[in-house]
Image: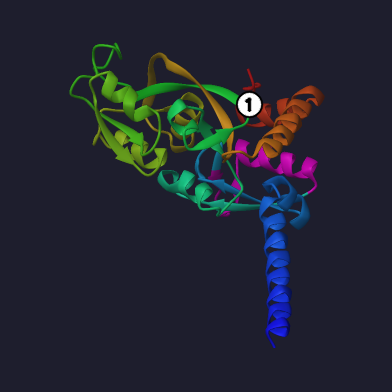
Amino acid sequence: MKKGFLFIMILIFMNVTAACDFNKDNDERNVLEQIKEKEEINVGIEGAYPPFNFYNSSNELEGFDVDITNEIAKRMGVKVNFVATPWDSIIGGLLSNKYEIIISSMAITEERKQKVDFTEPYYRTGAQLFAPSNTDIKDVNTDLKGKKIGVVTGTTFTKEVERLGGEPVLYKSDLLSFLDLSNGRIDGAITDKAVGGNIIVENDYDLSPVGNILYDEVAGITVNKGEKELVKEIDQHIKDMVKDGTYKDISEKWFGTSIYE
């Protein structure tokens, strides 16, 4: 009986060990392998940052980021599932595996690199202050003290307002901050130069950029820590798009020029 019991226990142990090894093999597959196997990539995107990513009048997602994403997915041989997510929780969604990557004009910063990894920059841009055309803000380095300046929650622009002595007023999106700015509820707003210019044109606001770009920013595609193979593949597709002219075509469609460098 004891020998029989021991034999049964050995069989059970072997089966459990085999099952654990199988699950371990599955868990150790990198994200790129999982994406290729299911032939689908889930992409976190804000959807409220025109002309980079936004919903048009037909409630369809479009913009520079959307076109870049679709082209990358095409070259990977997978379909895209966009997951629209508020900006202030978009990194949290990646960390909780709601999507495999974020392509949503995220600036590469040292603070963010503590939590996530980035590809090489896929475009370069700059932070710009916008204000009413009749503003008394003439010099951004001296005239922002005590001014209410709109910024989107979770962006790098908040610290810039504080550095310049202004009072940051937080919004869910640039569309909302520019609406308040046009109605006189705040004194200015800081966002990407191209984004602000697009909002002004689309809404016919009497607003203008003030001074030069405050600082340059580079945007990267965001992934979870350690996904080196996924980063490597995306980087290569971006380089190929630049080389064969596809990137230039997409960029000129939205900005009239290439924003890669």
Assess whether residue 68 is covered by the magenta stretch. Answer: yes
- Residue 253 lies, in percent from the top left, at 67, 31
Q: Position of residue 71 (x, y in %)?
A: 74, 39
> For numbered disc 1, what is the local secondary structure?
loop
Point out the stretch of residues depicted in magenta: 54-77
Location of residue 3 with respect to 156 vertically, above or below: below
Badge 1 density bin: few <14, some 14–19, many ≥20, Cα 10 Å: some
At horizontal 70% and vertical 67% (from top left) the residue drawn is 19
Residue 39 can be seen in this image: yes
Query: Residue drawn at (46%, 48%), measured in percent from left and top?
Result: 92
Give the image location of residue 183, x and y in percent. Answer: 28, 37
Q: Which residue is mark 1?
A: 120
**Quick one: quadrant of the N terminus?**
bottom right
Q: In this orientation, which residue lies closer to the viewer: 233 or 246? A: 233
Indicate yes or no whether the magenta region holds residue 122.
no
Q: Visible in this render: residue 132? A: no
What residue is rendered at 43% in x and 34% in y? 204
Q: How many marks?
A: 1
Q: Quadrant of residue 243?
A: top right
Placement of the C terminus among the 4 image quadrants: top right
In this orientation, which residue lies closer to the viewer: 138 or 12? 12
Residue 131 appears at what percent x and percent y?
A: 32, 25
In the shown orientation, is residue 120 left or right of residue 77? left
Left-right relation of 111 to 104: left
Describe residue 41's horizontal placement relative to residue 108 as left or right.
right
Is residue 150 depicted above or below 125 in this figure?
below
Of 30 and 96, nearer the camera is: 30
Q: Residue at x 34, y 33 (%)?
A: 151
Amino acid of disc 1: Glu
